[in-house]
Amino acid sequence: MPLRIAIDTGGTFTDVVAINDQTGEQWAVKTPSTPDDPSIGLLTGMRKAADRAGFPESDINQLLHGSTTATNAVLEHKFEGLGLLVTHGFRHIIEIARQSVPDGYGNSYFWVKPPRLVPLHLVQEVPGRIDFQGKEIEPLDEDTLIKAAEKLVSRGVKCIGVCLLHSYANDEHEKRVGQILIDRFPDIFISLSSVVLPEYREYERAMTTLIDVMVKPYCKTYLRHAEDQLRAQAGDAPFLIMQSNGGVVSAEAAGQKPVTMLLSGPAAGVLGATYMSNLAGHKDVLTLDVGGTSTDVSLVEDLNPQLTTHSLIEHYPVKTPMLDIATVGTGGGSLAWIDDYGNLKVGPKSAGADPGPICYSRGGKKPTVTDAALVLGRLPNALVGGELALDIDGARSAFADLGSSFNISAEEAAAGVFEIAAANQVNGIRQVSVLKGRDPGLYALVAFGGAGGLFAAEVADFLNITTVLSPPNPGNLSAFGLHVSDIKRDYIRTIVRRQTSSNHAELLKVWSDLESLGREEISREGVEEKAIESHYSADMRYVGEGHEVPVKVPQGLSKEDAVLYIWDEFHNVHEKTFGFQYRDQQDVELVNLRVQAVGRAHRPEVSKINNTSDKLEIDSLRQVFWRDHGWLECPIYKRADFPTGYKVEGPAIFEEYGSTVVVPQKWLVFKDEFGNLILERIS
Amino acid sequence: MVFDAKATIGPVELEVIAGTVRSAELEIEAAVERTSRSPMIRDQHDYRVALFDARGRKLTGRSYSALVEPIFEYFGEENINEGDVFFWNDPYNSCGGIGHIPDLCTTIPIFYEKRLIGFSQVFGHHDDVGGAVPGSMPVKATDMWTEGLVVPPIKLYERGNINKAAYEIIARNSRLSEHLKGDIDAEIGAARLGLNRITEMAERYGVDALEAAFDMIIENCTRTIREELLPKIKDGVYHWEDYIECDGVEAPKLHAMRLTMTKTPDGILLDFSGTDPEAKGPINWPIDYADGKFARKWMAPVLRSLASSPDRAAEIDMNEGVLDVIDVKFPEKGTLVTPTFGKPTGLRFFILLRSLGIFAACLSKATGGQMPADHETIRIWGLHGGKNAEDFFLFREVLGGGGPGRPWADGSDVVHIVPNSRNLPAEFSEQRYPVQVEKLGLAIDSGGAGYRRGGFGYDKRIRLLEDARLLSNADRALLNTYGVNGGKAGKTYGIEIQHKSGNEETVPGMADNIEVSSGSIVHIVTTGGGGWGDALNRETGMVCYDVECGLVSLEAAKNQYGVVLKDTEKGYVVDEQKTQALRARLRNERGKLPMFDRGQYFNKISESEGIKWPDGWIDPDVDWDAETGVSEDEATAV
């Protein structure tokens, strides 16, 4: 049973990559997504891929799945019937939020607080109080609880989030609430904050818990559908789901804490990019995933994609650890338009998949970035291996119109739109680099997604980046990334202790507890005990600071040594993050202890390319327009023909099924033995 | 827009440069927050950043900023060199750009190929710059020198070389000198990011294109105001006033800030003549310098509330371009906005925010009441205690209040005018300080009633677990936030202590060192926003829902909104018949609805002692009625 299938479900299309576990051979297929019940598209994709590979479905030994459907469902406000139970005195917790108003000074005059996830009449209080050390100071009032829950259910609530004060320190009240709710209302979905996120800060914990319970019915249902049918076809092959932390877990585990699936859409692409850049010898990279409507960027340091616990979904905080990915509203389908004051703009409005760019001839009338690429000669006259003929005249005439508003030619307008799109992506990259104190010029840029290779070198020029990577099959890198993921779960407990008064044994115990929980859950995924790793880390700050920095413990250190290590290492991390430290001057405070449990998954081999020919045939010549040089005759190559060890100087264009890589002047390109195209700037 | 009029700049360069300036503003802000040390900057976000062109014209537009003019005034253009870092905090020698001493301002010039092409600037509120009390904001200050170390514009670095003596003197005068040094270094480092971004653009497109783009960025702002916002304001002369209720030194009395707004087709003149004399205490605000550029740029963003939607308002950048539309005139020396040299300014944030309120009120008059009502103000309260120096704690919160009711929405609840300023989670406060938060809620009935009511303020109850002393630094404890266009005033700020002994004590807005013993409860209520529009026109279902949620009392629903509710098994239900009858009666009884409602305290003073207006100034509220869309005839006919 050698076939591993990875299915990446996007808003419009589902990408599938199947890999023969024994030979490393890969097959890719595409099928439309089915957002109402994503299991339909998922199973269609699975079947198609097995067919393409020439294996029966019973030969599938693993199914991996990443999806944007849960996130999209949240963004489309598909959910209702949500209720919240909180501690007495805190009914207004989500109305108050954190009082902060985004953006500029004085925006509070006109800014309108977005609607709360749960309307206030569906928030009820429960008397009972635990203090921050976990001591009960007032018992839980069960009668009031039952009345409150009955009130919610009578008003149509189907999903209840429970967030009681200090439940991270002592979950007894919450557990009791959970038990009473299950006993009385077996059909109601419930999430307890002490299970979803046992971390202090009541508002953020409540929101994370609410979002978890909100998507539970949707995620559980479609995952169960998919799993049932998978079982019918492929027996007990593991069915693994991508989470936003960059790891996978079983569908069953994912359904129990679905908040970890949200915003996971772009995560697999980052894993794929990291994997391929490692093969190419680059450990510090920026990833640039250019899709139809937007571009996702992230920063990878020493092969570790950066994690954040400050994500927002729409306006609402989600505090579970996620890959730190910034999204810019500029992609291939982004529209070029003129605002009321005559300024040229690109995005965030998009032609989407329907009607799409003008050149796709599906009824699109407005010029897009893809149309600009065609006008400039960056794209061939037909896409996807010749299947889709492109309407270059339509695109040209739209840019001639656009240009006439500024007295410039169609190609100048197209080149300008291209430059603005690249500049928008550059600003996105600065969000994950400069804003975090990193210099993007020190990283290599890995460009993927259908349109990544069109922009990468231009984006790199803006940022003084000198190396660009285009991995093989860049349009399918997200699906490929699922294949190189590990099983991962994150565990956290808030335990606020100062260094001067902390108890070594107490911290060890918390780490041990989290670790055993992790080992138990990961081994339930079928991972052998010895293949499970525990990564310890802590969130810490100087006493008096309002936010924490994560301190990671290196692998190989025992828990005992790790406790000593974090108190010392904290100062270094603080210095690196903020540029200063107070070693021996200020007391340090531990806030959270974390464990990430990792089950190392078997990874498929990437087959090496064996083409060291010293010849490269030019496939064709095409006029290509550059802002600085005007029209130049440019050699077009088939990417597949490009031998390893052979260097080509730009301008040059490399084409393949589903993607195009542009090599401008002052850039060299070669292919490594893993099929990566590597562009280097000639200084 | 005709681009060929300016041959040096095309639409692409403009869009990329404008986008880069915007992105650079965010990058500088992130760097300030990441690398500075004062909690006021890191957590309360009390800092501002800006990029300017070579003439000192502000290019960035998300927030207000200080000015570059002091550099030209003090040093002259010929003495600005690559590698210089300019530095100051002197409220009387910063051309009005720096209002109080804790705000340290750092500016670096940007050069490209030896040519000055701009400036990058950061100022932030530092925790301690010396003076009479820790935190450098003494409520009882009667001169500037009590408030901390004053630095006129200096070069902290000259051509890359630090002025070590100045640096050490500044640091030594702070109780937290290491923090202060760190903050200054952070400001310089952050400002450099702006420098890098601007020189990169010069490199890519050339200095001529860059400067042409700067012109266009500024011009676009002017055009946006002219074409989108000004046409909504009726030409004419409007005046209004509002007050600070206490200066911290003298007994409470009304300190009036007065504004006459003259709107013409081309622009707006803001005249502060008639404003009351300077105060003894620290509520003065010296802005009568450099043609009032600071005040003009500070006040202009109020106009954004006239945009077609809140989303559009958030998009409108307010940069140097506002100067072409807004002019300003000041009274003679010696008033609250033209204080004589050396008067204290530490708590100038009251008047700073009042200026926005009186401008908004003048605009309400000129737009048929289409502006938001009164906004919450800045306030700080706290507890400090501990048995000894080691044990000392200071629990200080900048709590928000209710936002203003406005034509498009109710006021947002518990917001703060400083962007991204956050409250303290109860779970944090309880870990850190000897307190137990018994309630963190919205204050019932605090938002002014209206067709769109004001946002609610906080209702916070804290039990002390140790003895402590309480401080409060707030106004609007006596005077209410005003309501507009028939909307009612919002409720005031207040602190009450329920002492363990059983006594109750009401704390004045400006107070320090009030003893509170362990076991007592401190009860804080912050201001609600002013209401907008006629409360009797509010949709009955919305009133019912607010009552159902416990945000509006049954009594207020009846008296303020004229809504009669029935308590049923399924919750409250509107009694439509009784409601209609009650609303008709209330309409008849009340007569004309005024444009502004300033609330009870003001009405009491106005009735008892009266308000004393300067010569030639008349009551700004009289003869201004709400434009509620319901005529008197209709109202009585019901």
Image (cartoon, coloured by chain):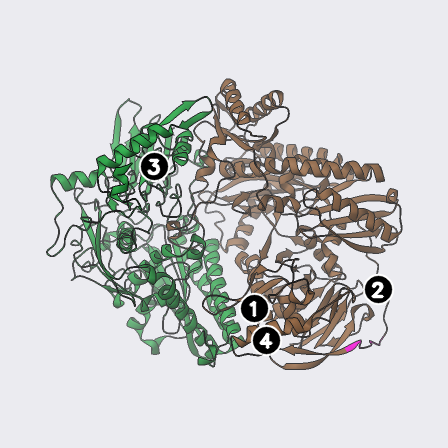
- Name the residue: 81% across, 51% down: A18
Q: Alpha carbon of mark 3 to alpha carbon of mark 2: how far?
A: 69 Å
Circle 2/circle 1 CB separation < 8 Å: no
Q: Which chain is brown?
A: A
In this rendering, the label closer to the viewer, 1 or 4: 4
Task: Tell me where the magenta segment starts and ends, as one range.
Answer: A614-620
Residue B333 seen from this side: yes
Circle 3/circle 1 CB separation < 8 Å: no
Q: Are marks 2 and 1 on the same chain?
A: yes
Three-letter amino acid code at disc 1? Ile
Q: Which residue is mark 4?
A: A400
Q: How many marks?
A: 4
Chain for numbered disc 4: A
Q: Alpha carbon of mark 4 to alpha carbon of mark 3: how far?
A: 67 Å
Nearer to the camera, A613 or A579: A613
Q: Which residue is mark 1?
A: A420
In this rendering, the label closer to the viewer, 3 or 2: 2
Q: Which residue is mark 3?
A: B383
Is B437 placed above or below A452 here?
A: above
